[in-house]
Amino acid sequence: MSASINIALIIGSLRKESINRKFAEFIAAQMPDNVTIKEVHIADLPLYNQDYDDTTIDSYERVRQQLKDADAVLMVTPEHNRTMPAALKNVVDIGSRPYKKSVWTRKKVAVVTASPGSFGGINSGLDVRKSMQMLSAQVMIDPEIHLSRATDSLNEDGSVSERTQKFLQSFVTEFVKFAGQSRD
Ligand code: FNR
């Protein structure tokens, strides 16, 4: 039997009808039985302020603990103005502090981006990778998933088109291998 794997899912869009949420939900539904995937909710997190490092903020403690407990983190995110959305950057910053207590150190992280535009949100993905590299996370680099013209990959009922399902299923296979690899 495969060892159990615990995945934390962060969705970079706060929007109710988010296309990224639809792809994230499809990806989550493809996980094998030995994988537990739980969303880390980021909408209620106060904007990071270094002054908070000496205080206890319940929502900060919640996300830091969820990220610490995870074998790997999967981010599924749009691009806002050629970079990651502010809400996603906020949780990156919250997880990185207090100094020397970052939850990102050696954490396995994978990023999927989706956009209705032709670049697929690639700059958002690259900027997440840049921050994660600086934070000494282990970033999954292959395959890189940036879904361009992503609204075309959704059927009218919001389900993922067959072609993109296959693509995302092959990503899940590689991601689960990556998440299950020993960190030492
Ligand atoms: C966007 N969008 C966008 N798209 C893109 O490919 N590159 C970009 O730089 C931006 N910039 C941007 C800024 C802001 C403030 C908004 C609200 C939107 C469009 C974006 O990809 C589109 O709204 C997606 O549908 C957002 O993803 P969700 O929220 O549907 O998951």
Image (cartoon, rainbow, N blue to C red):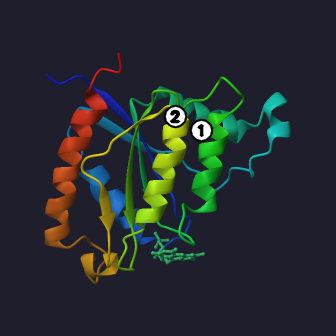
User: Distance between the Cα atoms at labels 1 and 2?
Assistant: 6 Å
Task: Identify residue for label 2.
Answer: 67
Q: What residue type is labelled 1?
A: Val
Q: Position of residue 124 (x, y in %)?
A: 48, 61
Q: How far across and how far down the image is residue 26, in percent?
A: 28, 59
Q: Mark 1 points at which residue?
A: 63
Q: Residue at x 40, y 64 (%)?
A: 122
Asked if ligand 1 lies within 8 A of label 1, the reply is no
Report whether 77 appears left or right of 63: left
Mark 1 and mark 2 residues within 8 Å of each other at the beta carbon: yes
Amino acid type for the residue under numbered disc 2: Leu
Q: Total label count? A: 2
Would residue 65 appear left or right of 22 to someone viewing this image? right
Q: In this view, does 78 lie above or below 91?
A: below
Measured along the vertical axis of the image, is residue 3 above or below residue 171? above
Looking at the figure, which quarter contains the C terminus?
top left
Residue 21, quarter of the rendered image:
bottom left
Q: Closest to the observer: 125 or 169?
A: 125
Foreground of the two, 87 or 143: 143
Res 38 → quadrant: top left
| Quadrant showing the N terminus | top left
Instruction: Label 1, secondary structure: give it.
Output: helix
In this view, the residue in front, 172 or 6, is 172
Residue 159 lies, in percent from the top left, at 26, 72
Q: Residues within 10 Å of mark 2 (few under 14, many from 20)?
A: many
